[in-house]
Amino acid sequence: MTRAKVGPNARIATMIVTFRPAAVADLIRPMLRPTSRPARAPATVRGLLALILPMIVTLGAVFAPMSAARAQASAPQAAAVPTGATAGATADAAAKRDFEGERKSIGDARAWTNYRFATAERACYSKFLVNRCIEQAQDVQREELHVLRKRELDVGNAERAERAATRDREQAIRNAEFEASQPGRAANEAASRASYDRKQQEQQLRDAQRAGEAPARTANAQAFQQKQADFDARVKAAQQSGAEQARQRQENVKAFQDKQRQAADRQRDLDERRERAKQNQNSGGNTPSPFGF
């Protein structure tokens, strides 16, 4: 694949955009550090550097979109259309985008802008037009903060878009899984319906069998009731027979007692007669009869 030709303006813009503020800070920080014997010239140099550096950053922010658009317009059409591998790599890079790192970079750039404004503001107090110098520094700070704020909003929009894309992919995966499991669910539902119908038929058969066995159960119940009635009758007859036997035993006991009493009375009469006969014999009378008469 042939490389697109890049013009001089694009190269300058690329140099400005890729110009690292941290490296510039490392270069000019020794110049901005106050010495033991301050002079007019170093303060002027520091003021010029504080004013030139924001202009460089602003020019980079202005020329970057122009150079990118020109490079894209001058690139061949074949290079503009990414292949499947390039698209996959681009998607992976977008998926692995470090938003926290970008926010940290924006925060560092904001801190660097505020530091340069504070430095420029201190340098302005050594000039004749102090207010004008501070206003210019504030204008530069506002422009840079505006660019950083725009970048921050772009990062937030990109993060929200990525989250939405992730949610869409997950929802698409869930939908695909749902659609893929649809035949299995249909089969399970059909099996459940068949099992339910089979159980209903078995219950109907049991109900019909019970209905057919109802007369037999009724006859069995009647026979049981008859047997229970016969048993109750036999129990009642046995109770009556026992009561009659008990009464007869009482009567027999009473008759036996009467006989015993009569026998005792007869024995007492016999003893009395014998005693009388013995007395008569002792008195010289006739020999008494052994039977007492």
Image: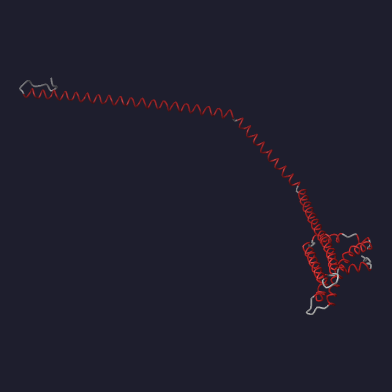
Q: Left of 205 or right of it: where is 99?
A: right
Q: Residue at x 80, y 71 (%)?
A: 122
Indicate the quadrant where residue 105 lies: bottom right
Q: Position of residue 164 (x, y in %)?
A: 79, 54
How far from the left and from the top, in percent, is residue 153? Answer: 81, 59
Question: How many numbered marks, from 0 up?
Answer: 0
**Residue at image coords 68%, 39%:** 196
Q: Position of residue 155 (x, y in %)?
A: 81, 60
Q: Is 156 drawn above or below residue 131 in the view shown?
A: above
Dividing the image into 4 quarters, which one contains the N terminus?
Answer: bottom right
Which quarter shows the C terminus? top left
Q: Is residue 136 above or below residue 164?
A: below
Which of the 4 quarters of the picture holds residue 197? Answer: top right
Frontmost residue, 142 versus 110: 142
Q: Could you say where residue 183 lies in the image, as x and y percent from the top left?
A: 76, 46
Question: Position of 108 compared to 228: left or right?
Answer: right
In the image: residue 10, left or right of residue 115: right
Q: Nearer the viewer, residue 110 or 263?
A: 110
* Residue in front for this viewpoint, 125 or 269: 125
